[in-house]
Image: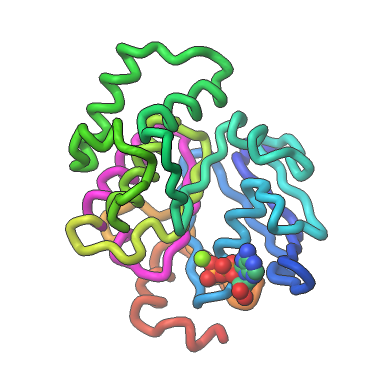
């Protein structure tokens, strides 16, 4: 078995007293892009956070395997070091830490080695150009005073620089204008070029998906995956909404 990058079984999770995820199964193979759609409050962000090991979201049942290894009890840092990445729906502002330093620290933590500065700067400049980000943003404090679109681009920049094996994008397209969605989509496409890089794209719009390769789509309602299918499911939801699944 197991060339799966991610395999989760019967994941249940609570925030406070409330059970949010009620038994989620999901298997993602290397190189695959899965899309997770669902109405507000369905548990999409909760699933992303549970996968990443955010302790606020208490997993009460189920197992998470990453590359065949059980990581259910591992810390978020350890998961990041394995090559898991979560782009936040609401990226945090971090005064006193520049975007560039933040990314450099993240790479150092992931690899356990110092970053080669010249090569790093070159890659950073290339990725920022691809995302249409002015170079000056590298030395600005992380997300401080960034517009919504700039924050989302900064998240994609982190993904491109970290080159995770598996990335979760949580509504990276929400609140963006048409041009910013296109740019973010270009960034995601660039990541898809990485041969075995897997993606879980959480969204409830379909704009970002228009030009991306999608392998599987899942619909989550009230903490359960109620339907899974191919890329055509995205179009169906786009047309008919979630009504049929509520
Ligand atoms: N940090 C939190 N504290 C309290 N409740 C939360 C928290 N995160 C999520 N919830 C609750 O869990 C449910 C699912 O939220 P969420 O996973 O963010 O949904 P989605 O991302 O699908 O819109 C909602 O009812 C939400 O209020
Ligand atoms: Mg959410």
Residue 18 quadrant: bottom right
Q: Residue 235, image x and y in percent?
A: 35, 72
User: Is residue 10 in view?
Assistant: yes
User: Is residue 228 in view?
Assistant: no
Q: Does residue 226 appear left or right of residue 105 in this picture?
A: right
Task: Tell me the magenta residue range.
Answer: 181-209
Colour theme: rainbow
Query: Taking 168 as reference, is 17 above or below it?
Result: below
**Residue occupying the point 66% across, 50% down:** 54
Residue toward you, 44 or 92: 92
**Residue occupying the point 34% across, 50% down:** 151
Q: Residue 102, image x and y in percent?
A: 44, 32
Residue toward you, 32 or 104: 104
Q: Residue 212, image x and y in percent?
A: 32, 53
Query: Taking 130 as reference, is 241 above or below it?
Result: below
Q: Does residue 66 appear left or right of residue 205 in this picture?
A: right
Residue 220 quadrant: bottom right
**Residue lying farthest front?**
96
**Residue occupying the point 40% across, 55% down:** 214
Q: Residue 132, image x and y in percent?
A: 18, 42
Residue toward you, 125 or 145: 145
- Quadrant, the N terminus: top right
**Residue 203 is a magenta residue:** yes
């Amino acid at each position: 078995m197991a060339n799966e990058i991610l395999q989760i079984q019967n994941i249940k999770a609570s925030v406070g007293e409330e059970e949010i995820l009620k038994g989620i199964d999901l298997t993602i193979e290397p190189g695959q892009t899965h899309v997770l759609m669902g109405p507000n409050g369905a548990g999409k962000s909760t699933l992303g956070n549970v996968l990443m090991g955010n302790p606020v979201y208490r997993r009460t049942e189920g197992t998470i395997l990453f590359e065949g290894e059980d990581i259910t009890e591992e810390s978020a840092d350890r998961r990041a070091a394995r090559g898991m990445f979560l782009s936040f729906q609401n990226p945090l502002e971090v005064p006193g830490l520049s975007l560039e330093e933040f990314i450099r620290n993240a790479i150092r933590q992931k690899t356990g080695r110092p970053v080669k500065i010249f090569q790093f700067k070159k890659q950073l400049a290339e990725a920022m150009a691809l995302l249409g980000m002015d170079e000056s943003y590298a030395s600005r404090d992380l997300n401080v005073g960034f517009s919504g679109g700039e924050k989302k681009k900064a998240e994609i920049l982190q993904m491109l620089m970290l080159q995770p094996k598996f990335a979760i994008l949580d509504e990276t397209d929400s609140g963006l204008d048409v041009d910013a969605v296109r740019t973010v989509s270009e960034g995601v496409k660039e990541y898809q070029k990485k041969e075995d890089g897997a993606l879980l794209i959480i969204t409830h719009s379909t704009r970002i998906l228009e030009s991306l390769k999608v392998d599987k789509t899942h619909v989550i309602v009230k903490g359960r995956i109620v339907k899974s299918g191919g890329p055509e499911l995205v179009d169906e939801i786009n047309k008919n909404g979630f009504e049929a699944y509520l």
